[in-house]
């Protein structure tokens, strides 16, 4: 039995939305500077990572609300993110018991910080004129 609460589940959407916003900013700024095949791979990868995170957060919310335990949404995250980012702070947590609330809160805190930094970096690059290089 997982120990998810609605606030924890809602917090799971924060890094997903930060990643999505940062990805869109970078896609728009880099579109004219990348070969079309390279851009297609970049866009597909960011869409894949965003979708994986969104589906995992959606599963956690549905579970916390007691609506359902749609197991496929829970298990899609790792296969879908195989082309995505690997966060060094997440490696140590992957071996922990994911059913315990403490490890989920630690994971989400690290994920929020990491994706927030990614968004901040994308905004700095955007504001410095990345698209006009």
Image: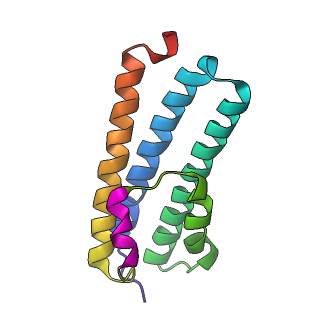
132 in relation to 53, above or below: above
Instruction: Write the residue at 40% across / 51% down.
Output: 15
43 in relation to 11, above or below: above
- Most common SS among magenta residues: helix
- Does 92 lie within the magenta span? yes
Q: Position of residue 28 (x, y in %)?
A: 56, 24
Which residue occupies the extreme right position in the image?
Answer: 37
Q: Nearer the viewer, residue 39 or 25?
A: 39
- Quadrant in the picture for residue 128: top left
Instruction: Write the residue at 26% across / 76% down.
Output: 102
Q: Position of residue 89 (x, y in %)?
A: 32, 60
Q: Nearer the viewer, residue 88 or 106?
A: 88
- Does 98 lie within the magenta span? no
Q: Quadrant of the N terminus?
A: bottom left
Asked which colour scheme the image uses, the reply is rainbow
Which residue occupies the extreme top position in the image?
Answer: 132
Instruction: Write the residue at 48% across / 80% down.
Output: 66
Q: Position of residue 55 (x, y in %)?
A: 56, 62
34 in relation to 16, above or below: above
Q: Position of residue 46 (x, y in %)?
A: 57, 44
Is residue 103 rendered to the left or right of residue 50? left
Instruction: Write the residue at 32% across / 41% down.
Output: 117
**Number of numbered discs:** 0
Is residue 111 rendered to the left or right of residue 83? left
Q: Which residues are magenta?
A: 88-95
């Amino acid at each position: 039995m997982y120990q998810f609460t609605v606030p924890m589940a809602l917090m799971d959407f924060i890094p997903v939305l930060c990643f999505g916003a940062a990805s869109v900013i970078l896609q728009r700024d880099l579109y004219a500077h990348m070969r079309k095949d390279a851009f297609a791979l970049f866009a597909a990868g960011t869409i894949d990572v965003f979708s994986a995170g969104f589906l995992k957060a959606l599963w956690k919310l549905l579970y916390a609300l007691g609506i359902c335990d749609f197991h496929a949404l829970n298990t899609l995250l790792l296969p879908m993110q195989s082309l995505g980012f690997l966060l060094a702070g997440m490696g140590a947590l992957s071996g922990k018991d994911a059913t315990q609330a403490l490890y989920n809160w630690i994971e989400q805190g690290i994920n929020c910080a990491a994706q927030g930094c990614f968004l901040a970096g994308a905004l700095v690059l955007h504001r410095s004129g990345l698209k006009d290089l």
